[in-house]
Image: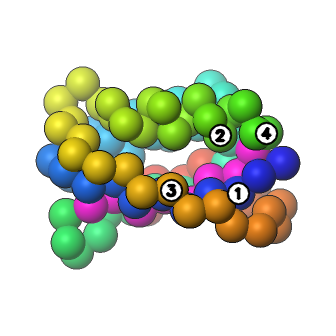
Amino acid sequence: MERAKIKVIGDVQGVFYRFSAKIMADNLGITGWAENEPDGSVAMVIEGESEAIKQFVRWAREGSPMAEVEKVEVEKEKYKGDIRSFEVR
């Protein structure tokens, strides 16, 4: 199991990015959360199986159909196992 902190930069607010992230996370069995940041980015923390995390990060580089992702920053964190579902904040 792994945990990652993700920052998505680009036109990613107001384009259903966070809700699309929830759908993808639920499909992959990933838990975590996604929230808009004041700088216009979307921040996420996710936990799950290694391959599911990799698939989610690949998806994050594209995002929702209306999103225009410029950059995705991924930082591995120590797995905690303290998140039970994926939440849009």
Indicate which label's residue lies in the foreground, 2 or 3: 3
- 1 or 4: tag closer to the N-terminus: 1
Which residue in the protein does label 4 denote?
Answer: 49
Q: Which residue is mark 3?
A: 74
Q: Is residue 14 visible?
A: no
Which residue is denoted by mark 1 in the rendering?
3
Give the residue type at disc 1: Arg
| Label 2 close to label 4 by CB (< 8 Å) | yes
Please name whichever residue, 79 or 18, is drawn nearer the observer in this view of the structure.
Answer: 79
Local secondary structure at mark 4? loop
- Mark 2–mark 4 distance (CA, rounded to whole Å): 6 Å
In the rendered structure, the answer to whether residue 25 lies left or right of residue 7 reads right
Which of the pair 15/4 is nearer the observer? 4
Image x and y of residue 70, in percent? 22, 46
Q: Look at the picture and state if 1 lies above or below 29.
A: below
For residue 53, the mark is: 2
Label 3 is placed on what type of residue? Val
Could you tell whether 40 is left or right of 84 in the image? left
Q: Residues within 10 Å of mark 2 (few under 14, many from 20)?
A: many
Pointer 4 or 3: first along the chain = 4
Q: Main secondary structure of the magenta part?
A: strand
Find out whether the residues at labels 2 and 1 contact each other: C-beta distance under 8 Å.
no
Q: Can you give x and y, in whole percent of width and height, for residue 41 in the image?
A: 27, 61
Q: Compare residues 75 and 12 and report the one nearer the observer.
A: 75
Element class at badge 3 = strand
Magenta part of the chain: 41-48
**Residue shown at the point (77%, 52%) measured from the top left:** 2
Element marked by disc 1: strand
Mark 3 or 1: in front is 3
Crowd class of label 3 (few under 14; some 14 to 19; many from 20; radius 10 Å): some
Counting residues from the start of the chain, the first of labels 2 and 1 encountered is 1
Labels in figure, total? 4
